[in-house]
Amino acid sequence: MTTLTIELPDNLVQEAKDAGLLNPEAIETMLRENLRRRAVDGLFAAADKLAAAHFPPMTMEEIQQEVNAVRQQRK
C-alpha cells in the first residue's frame, strides 16, 4: 500500500470532504473509474483512426490467413 500526499485548494478539499469523497475507498473508486474511462476513450480513438484510414474490408479468407500467420509466429 502506498501513502499519497497531494496539494489541493482549500475550498475543493472542503467540498470533497462534505461529499464524502476523501476516504480511501472513494478515491480508489474515482481513480479506477477514470482509468477505465480513459481506456475506453483510447479504444474509441483507435477505432476512429482505423475507420478514417479507409482500409478495404477483409474477406473471411484473408482474416483466416492473418490468424494462421500469427499462430505460426507464436510457435
Image: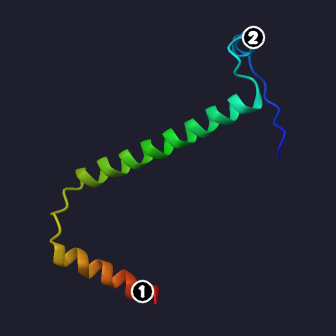
Q: How crowded is mark 1: few (under 14 residues within 10 Å), some or many (20 or more)?
A: few
Residue at position x 64%, y 34% in the image: 29
Q: Earlier in the sequence, mark 2 or mark 1?
A: 2
| Residue that carries the numbered disc 2 in the rendered image | 14
Quadrant of residue 71 in the image? bottom left
- Whole-Å distance between the Cαs marked 2 and 1? 56 Å
Q: Is 59 on the left-hand or right-hand side of 1? A: left
Q: Nearer the viewer, residue 9 or 64?
A: 64
Question: Which amino acid type corresponds to the residue marked 1 in the rendered image?
Answer: Gln
For residue 67, what is the image quadrant?
bottom left
Closest to the observer, 46 or 16: 16
- Kindly identify the amino acid type of the residue bearing the numbered disc 2: Gln
**Which residue is tagged 1?**
73
**In the rendered structure, are the residues bearing label 2 and label 1 in contact, judged by CB atoms less than 8 Å apart?**
no
* Residue 71 to residue 4: above or below: below
The number of callouts visible is 2
Q: In this view, does 74 lie above or below 28?
A: below
| Residue 53 in the image: above or below residue 18 | below
> Which residue sits at x=82%, y=46%?
1
Mark number displayed over residue 48: none
Q: How is the image coloured?
A: rainbow
Residue 63 occupies quadrant = bottom left
Judged left or right of residue 42, residue 36 is right
Instruction: Tell me the residue at 43%/42% (across/down).
Output: 41
In x, y percent, where is residue 20? Answer: 71, 18
Residues packed near mark 2 inside 10 Å, few (<14), some (14 to 19) or many (20 plus): some
Left or right of residue 35: residue 16: right
Residue 44: image location, x then y, percent: 36, 45
Q: Where is residue 37 in the image (x, y as percent from the top left)?
A: 49, 39
Relative image position of residue 39 (x, y in whole percent): 49, 46
Disc 2 is placed on an element classified as helix
Q: What element carries label 1?
A: helix
